[in-house]
Image (cartoon, rainbow, N blue to C red):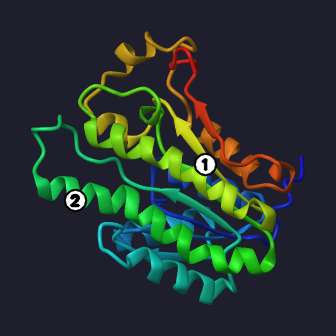
Amino acid sequence: MDLGLKGRRALVMGASSGLGYAVAERLVREGARVAICSRSESRIREASEKMGAELGVVTDLTKPGSVTALVEKVAGELGGVDVLVVNTGGPPKGGIEQLSAEQWHEAFQNLWMSTVEGIRAVLPGMRERRWGRILLVTSVAAREAMPGLTVSNGLRAGLMGLTRSISNEVAEYGITINDVLPGYHATERLTELGIPEEKISSQIPARRLGRPEELASLVSFLASEQAGYITGQSIAIDGGWMRGF
């Protein structure tokens, strides 16, 4: 299927590894002109060269104003941003009382405000061109709280409400915005959380972890011409892990 992404200008945040890398690589394969970002200069350079991205930018999402500057740079280099994929690093583990106020503020900037900044920065150009795709890669934690991930559970749930609200504001301009909610996937994040693959696989009806390329396929479709009537949605990709939604 031709997704109609050839020549489209895409910015994928947090794309030096894991799910973000898989998404960016798939968009490159679909013919999009792709820019990626990461806080590590060496990793972003290596990832850009490996996948064939047109631009790699060093960006620290925890710094206010960093995403606005990122979008401005990418739009200047590529001539605009047609597709924005927001993918941020996972916040620290811990319950409500275990994390410091500083950790809460940093996670809010990284997970929430970087998303708001990115959306605000790309919308004027998308509205002018009357076409745009905004995809938020969040987590099933947005719908079903995961133990020990209080920050993630709370902030990601809020992003679903933000998506629904924004979709009502921009749909008439040909702009869609959707959340993609990955479950347990075979990435570095799972290792960081210290979750044994065998243990979690036994709790998933599919009896395996998700593959990053499977999520990339979903995101690419939602970014396509064919998905122009899908907006304001939160779509889980979790092998059946969630119950009752």
Name which residue lies at 20% across and 53% down.
104
Q: CA distance from mark 2 to mark 1?
A: 24 Å
Q: Position of 211 compared to 45: left or right? A: right
Q: Position of 118 compared to 237: left or right? A: left
Please identify the quarter of the rendering in which residue 85 is found: bottom right
* Residue 102, percent from left and from top: 13, 59
Report the residue marked by disc 2. 105
| Callout 2: SS | helix
Q: Is residue 157 at least partly visible in the picture?
A: yes
Q: Position of 40 compared to 133: left or right? A: left
Q: Amino acid at mark 2?
A: His
Closer to the camera in the image, 28 or 62: 62
Name which residue lies at 45% across and 29% down.
184
Name which residue lies at 71% across and 51% down.
220
Q: Amino acid at mark 1?
A: Arg
Q: Is residue 174 at least partly visible in the picture?
A: no
Quarter of the image that includes the C terminus? top right
Comes first in the chain, label 2 or label 1: 2
Report the residue marked by disc 1. 164
Closer to the camera in the image, 177 or 1: 177
